Image (cartoon, coloured by chain):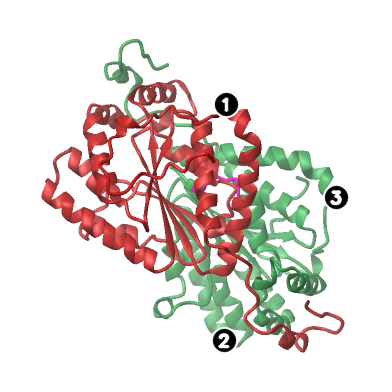
Chain colours: A green, B red
């Protein structure tokens, strides 16, 4: 991949400087098809080793405006992953019980154990996004939450969780196209939520709130990646590449059984010798 | 499919009467390949509708001797299912907290919500299997647990959970072959657990305990299916067919958005009219 779309740290981020139509040097889906298929195979093997080794876990956080393709990327890139070692958590409006705790409580319960991959479809970042856009928290409270988020992510990273934060970057025009497509497709109509149209009026405020997140919660342990997402084939390709890269860095391998091989021979039926 | 492998109810089950090598009239994988691919597509669409409708949930319970292929069938048949609506729970030795509750507690927490599919890799049935084999519970306690299980499954069924219980039926010879294969394959060695060899000495007691389960916990709402599993391609094919059949019976369809279509028009930008 030509770029990894990691956002720079300790620098003010302006979303308008990033092109949601970017596809690097690729013209269309066909141009990445072969590499995409290869990456899929790599992901399957890497996940298998992650699960076998049980030393690390991987937490993927997907954020993005309504219709940016969070559901789609999970379906397309992550179906095929062995479901035994993989889980998706979709964070909706907090329940009464969840609201009665600190804002990280419900997420902490769902972080992956060693060997596992978990994807968050939305996350605790909503608590510094939607709440800020609708003035439910002030700047001082937001600053506090940024600090809590950074400490929380450090805790996870210190306990062998790789954190991959992905923002799916779309344009406002792309969003309305997708809303309309939903309404004209009988198999997608049910996904239409009138509040998507209402929230659309707060587009600029959301972009600003995201910029706040990227400027304040972008650490070495838990970096943000901005993925151009107006072209779905390119979005899928980049996200898949990010996953494979993250797992490759772990130098995973298949472990041996916990008892020495020579001790096994006595346990096995005649003629059966482990290598 | 020629047979659905549903075990008869209210009848004593003898496992020795069922052939683990059975492949119906099919000779090999190639003969089912086309139908298998079609079933996979059907499963994808049915799951999408299940998720959209949010009226029912599906709980699949996989049981079987060590090396019967529970992990394998989940990986092969269920990867490809949209992970957003699907979860696997593998039940291991209970934790201290779990043991301090009734034996259904940890399973109940993980049952699927409406719209979702959950697969249990092992389940509360272990509490009337391994415990019986090792004489941790007596027959009287087992009878009590059978009743609790039946009431629990009725509770789930009454709240729109479809329960599909699948026993992967293998032979004792097949098991030792698989154990040996694990030890000779660097990518599978880590799965070898010496206790598999020790438990193998209790093969007959396990078969008897399973027969107790099939005779006592086979209800209309939660039927047991015995799937011949010595041939993995056939096992996958039968399990996939069972899943598709279970979902087909629900007459699923895509729902409309919750607000009337005509009310939407006012919300949309000019020129955009929902059908």
Tell me if label 2 and label 3 are in contact, CB under 8 Å: no
* Picture residue at 27% right of the left edge, 52% below the top: B95
Q: Nearer the viewer, mark 1 or mark 2?
A: 1
Can residue B182 be seen here? The reply is yes
Q: Secondary structure at mark 3?
A: loop
Q: How many marks?
A: 3
Q: Residues within 10 Å of mark 1 (few under 14, many from 20)?
A: few
For the N terminus of chain B, the image quarter is top right
Where is residue A25? Give x, y as percent: 86, 49
Give whichever of B252, B199 is nearer the camera.
B252
Tell me if label 1 and label 2 are in contact, CB under 8 Å: no
Chain letter, disc 3 residue: A
Where is residue A188? Give x, y as percent: 69, 68
Q: Nearer the viewer, mark 2 or mark 3?
A: 3
**Marks 2/3 same chain:** yes
**Among the 4 quarters of the image, the one containing residue B221:** bottom left
Q: Secondary structure at mark 2?
A: loop
Q: Which residues are magenta?
A: A79-83
Where is residue A33? Give x, y as percent: 78, 42
Q: Residues within 10 Å of mark 3 (few under 14, many from 20)?
A: few
Cα separation, mark 3 vs mark 1, equals 39 Å
Task: Report the magenta stretch's main SS.
Answer: loop
Give whichever of A220, A101 is nearer the camera.
A101
Residue at which label 1 appears: B28
Residue at which label 3 appears: A28
* Picture residue at 65% right of the left edge, 44% below the top: B38
A88 in relation to A197, above or below = above
Magenta-drawn stretch contains B105: no
Where is residue A39? Give x, y as percent: 68, 41
Q: Nearer the viewer, mark 3 or mark 1?
A: 1
Residue at which label 2 appears: A138
């Amino acid at each position: 991949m030509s770029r990894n779309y990691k956002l720079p740290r300790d620098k003010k981020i302006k979303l308008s400087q990033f092109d949601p139509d970017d596809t690097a040097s690729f013209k269309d889906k066909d141009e990445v098809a072969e590499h995409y298929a290869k990456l899929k195979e790599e992901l399957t093997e890497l996940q298998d080793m992650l699960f076998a080794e049980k030393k690390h876990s991987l937490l993927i956080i997907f954020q993005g405006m309504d219709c940016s393709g969070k559901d789609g990327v999970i379906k397309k890139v992550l179906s095929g992953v062995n479901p035994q070692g993989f889980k998706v958590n979709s964070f909706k409006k907090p329940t009464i019980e969840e609201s009665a705790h600190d804002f990280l409580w419900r997420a902490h319960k769902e972080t992956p154990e060693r060997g596992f991959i978990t994807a968050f479809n939305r996350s605790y970042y909503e608590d510094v996004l939607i709440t800020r856009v609708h003035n439910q928290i002030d700047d001082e409270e937001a600053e506090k939450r940024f600090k809590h988020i950074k400490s929380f992510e450090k805790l996870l990273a210190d306990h062998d969780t790789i954190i991959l934060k992905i923002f799916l970057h779309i344009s406002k025009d792309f969003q309305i196209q997708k809303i309309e497509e939903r309404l004209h497709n009988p198999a997608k109509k049910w996904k239409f939520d009138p509040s998507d149209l209402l929230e659309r009026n707060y587009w600029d405020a959301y972009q600003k709130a995201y910029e706040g997140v990227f400027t304040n919660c972008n650490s070495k342990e838990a970096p943000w990646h901005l993925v151009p997402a107006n072209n779905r084939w390119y979005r899928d390709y980049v996200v898949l590449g990010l996953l494979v890269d993250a797992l490759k860095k772990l130098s995973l391998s298949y472990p041996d059984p916990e008892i020495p091989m020579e001790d096994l021979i006595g346990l096995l039926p005649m003629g059966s010798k482990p290598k």
